[in-house]
Image (cartoon, rainbow, N blue to C red):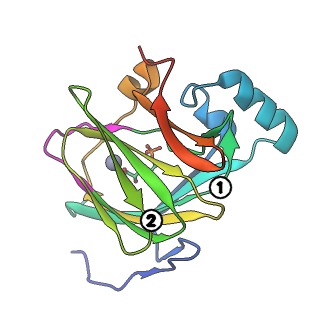
């Protein structure tokens, strides 16, 4: 039987204590997700293959509910702000919530039929991600972007569609400001 417990989440660093797992994605892991792979190669050659984001979870297979944090580094690749891969959930009834703790960003969402929405990510805002909306978070700030996510344990991730087709929109830095533009590679 699972026992109740308090889990400490540091909103500045994103550490989760206790946690059940973690992974990180480096720039090279995001090849095919940014719009400009040549710019990605140049960024890796210049800065090294740095960590783009880290995910820490509190997750028990015997419970329907999981949560954790995502910690995103600042920066751009070919003018595009650092992104997560982005995914649909495999289980079609599964939504999610993203509660931003620190930093600033944009949550980019795209429905199955191609509607695009954004939700501002900043401390105090909990973004509701409905089922059947692909979601990608984007760090548009100068500091780390840290958010807590709450999701069904067995929601599952489908990365294929986003990787193959791309999302319809990109968020790029224009005159120092985040700007939503069409993705020239969208298939
Ligand atoms: C989040 C994401 C996390 C990393 O936990 O998985 O922010 O983003 P990608 O999985 O798109 O690389 C979530 O949405 N879980 O369902
Ligand atoms: Zn998700």
Where's residue 125, x and y in %?
35, 69
Task: Based on the picture, tell me whether residue 89 belongs to the magenta stretch.
Answer: yes
Is residue 116 shown left or right of residue 159? left
Where's residue 132, x and y in %?
20, 38
For label 1, the residue is 74
Q: Residue furthest top?
A: 187
Residue 68 visible in the displayed image: yes
The secondary element bearing badge 2 is classed as strand
The secondary element bearing badge 1 is classed as loop
| Count of numbered tags | 2
Q: Residue furthest right?
A: 46
Would you say the beta carbon of the disc 2 residue lies within 8 angstroms of ligand 1?
yes
Residue at image position (78%, 36%) is: 43
Viewer-nearest residue: 56 or 165: 165
For label 2, the residue is 147
- Tell me the magenta residue range: 87-96
């Amino acid at each position: 039987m699972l026992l109740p417990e308090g889990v400490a989440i540091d909103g500045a660093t994103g550490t989760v204590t206790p946690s059940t797992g973690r992974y990180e994605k480096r720039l090279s892991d995001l090849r095919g997700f940014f719009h400009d792979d040549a710019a990605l190669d140049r960024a890796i050659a210049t800065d090294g293959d740095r960590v783009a984001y880290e995910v820490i979870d509190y997750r028990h297979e015997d419970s329907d509910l999981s949560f954790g944090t995502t910690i995103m580094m600042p920066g751009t690749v070919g003018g595009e702000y650092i992104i997560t891969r982005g995914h649909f959930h495999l289980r079609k009834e599964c939504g999610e919530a993203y509660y931003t703790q620190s930093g600033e960003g944009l949550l980019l969402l795209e429905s199955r039929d191609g509607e695009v929405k954004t939700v501002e990510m900043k401390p105090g805002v909990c973004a509701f991600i409905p089922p059947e909306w692909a979601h990608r978070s984007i760090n548009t700030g100068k500091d780390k972007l840290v958010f807590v996510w709450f999701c069904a344990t067995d929601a599952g991730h489908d990365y294929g569609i986003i990787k193959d087709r791309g999302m319809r929109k990109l968020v790029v830095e224009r005159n120092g400001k985040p700007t939503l533009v069409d993705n020239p590679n969208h298939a």
